[in-house]
Every structure is written in structure tokens, then in C-alpha cells.
Amino acid sequence: MGVRDEKCYTCGRANPGLWGFGPALRQLGADFGFAPLVIGASSVLYTLMLVASGSELQIAGGMMSFLAPSRRAMLLFGASGAVPVFQLGWWWTLLTASWLHANFLHILFNMMWVRDLGPAVVDLIGAPRTVIIYVVSGMCGFLLSSLMALSPIPIPLFHGAPLTLGASASILGLLGALLHYGQKSGSRLIHGQALNYVVILFVMGLIMPGVDNTAHAGGFLGGYAASVLFNPLSREKGDHLIIALGLLAITFLAIAYSIVHGLQLLA
């Protein structure tokens, strides 16, 4: 049974969840507001990055450069990678980069994935655990990418990046969690669909230029590991909500700090 089911179909036990606040949270929609939160916050930050780019904003130059914020704006708002994390010491960018995007197509495709996957993952494992997996997967992806960029032995297609951003690592984390759920529950449908999506995204990463495959791999592994830790078939707990809200609060505080701190150094 899913975490949103009102009662167990075997024993009839009620499922209030989250200290009884589950029914109230359900009023936010099919995904408890997860997808609108991610899409809304990412869109606002992308718009602010465009404004902050000023005359350095890229408008022409190909589809991958259409409405692309400047490198300075990316650093200012918290893009991650080997340069921010290790050269500048901005470790908090591991949290912030998942909410930032490099051009119009980048944010468009990523938010389409969030809109499609978000409600499904929330319905299976609950909104708080989905938020936790989304944030943790992004951190794992950008950490691996930053580390691999410093590796003395480069690995083709998985060489990391000096500067990286985007929701793709977190999206692969959601797919990793779905893949584990399919294995744990025995659902061939969920397992097969998640595996198909993973293959599609990795193939796209091999074909399209500028894709951080290392962050994708790290995000997928992070999401899968988080799902193993949570046991998605177990009952949702109130402390999951506390952790999720704490991660969101820390993330947006990190974005605010990045802007204030960056203005002092990049002005």
C-alpha cells in the first residue's frame, strides 16, 4: 500500500501519518506541493540569474545558449563544481546548485521531468522523503562531479566539471529511488519504467554536449542509497517531515548567503 492510502486494506488500520497532519497536507494536491515548489523556486531563481547577468546575458548563439545567465551570475547564486567547492571553498554550493539552471532549454526539460516524476514518487514514498531524496541526491551528484574534476586520471564521459548546476542530479536521484522501490516491492512495472527513464537520460547525456554525466551518476547512486536507508515500504514518520523542512530551510539560506557572500567577492 502507498503512504497516501487512508488505511491498510488487510487489517483496516488508519494511516493519519505525520502526527495526524497527513490529511491536511493532502489538500496541497496529488504531490503535496513538491513539484510546484521545485518548479516555482527554480523558475524564480533562473529569472533572477538572468536579471543579475545584465549585459552579459546570452540571448543568441544557439539553442544551448538561449537565455543563458552569465558565469558570474551562476557563481553568485551558487553553482557548484570543482572551482566553487575546492578552489573557492564554497561547500554550500552542493546544496544550492540543484535549483539553478544554465539556459532556457536546461530548465524547461528539467522541470518537465520534475512535473512528471514528482507526483509519482510522492505517492509511493511520501512528500518528506521525496524532498530528502531530491536534496541529498543533488549533493551527492555535485560532490562526485567536483571530486572527479580533480582526478589525475580522467575517465571518458565521467570527468566531472569545474562549474556545474541543474536539477538533473536530483532527478536521477528520484529515478534511483523509484528503481529501488520497484525492486523492494516486486513491482515490475515501476522497476521497468524507472530503468527505461534512467537509460534515456544517460543516453541523452552521452549525446548532448555540456551534460555532467558524473553528477547524474552521483545523483542516481545517492537517491538509490537514500531509498535503501529509508525502506520505502515502511510507514512514513514525523521526523522525515522535520528533516525535509530543515533541508529546504538550509538550502534557501545557503542560496541567500551565496548571493550576499558572492556580491562581496565578485563585485
Image (cartoon, rainbow, N blue to C red):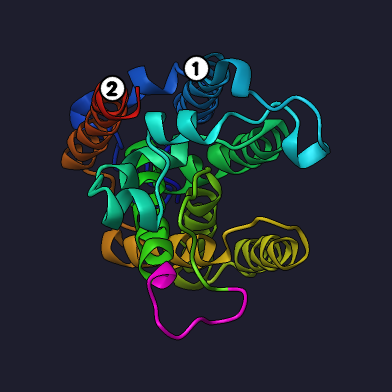
Q: Which residues are magenta?
A: 148-157
Q: Mark 1 Cα within 10 Å, few/some/many (few <14, many 20+)?
A: some
Q: Where is residue 182 drawn, in percent x and y?
A: 53, 66
Residue topped by disc 1: 52
Left or right: 213 as drawn, with respect to 197 = left
Q: Where is residue 169 drawn, in percent x and y?
A: 50, 53
Residue topped by disc 2: 256
* Residue located 28% across and 22% down the image: 256
Left or right: 55 as drawn, with respect to 78 = right
> Does 24 appear in magenta?
no
* Residue located 29% across and 31% down the image: 248
Quarter of the image for residue 240 reads top left
Q: Mark 2 Cα within 10 Å, few/some/many (few <14, many 20+)?
A: some
Please, is residue 94 above or below residue 4 in the view?
Answer: below
56 or 147: which is nearer to us?
56
* Residue located 60% across and 44% down the image: 117
Quarter of the image for residue 262 reads top left
> Does 154 appear in magenta?
yes
* Residue located 70% across and 39% down the image: 109
Mark sitting earlier along the chain (1/2): 1
Q: What amino acid is at disc 1?
A: Ala
Residue 257 visible from this viewpoint: yes
Q: Main secondary structure of the magenta part?
A: loop
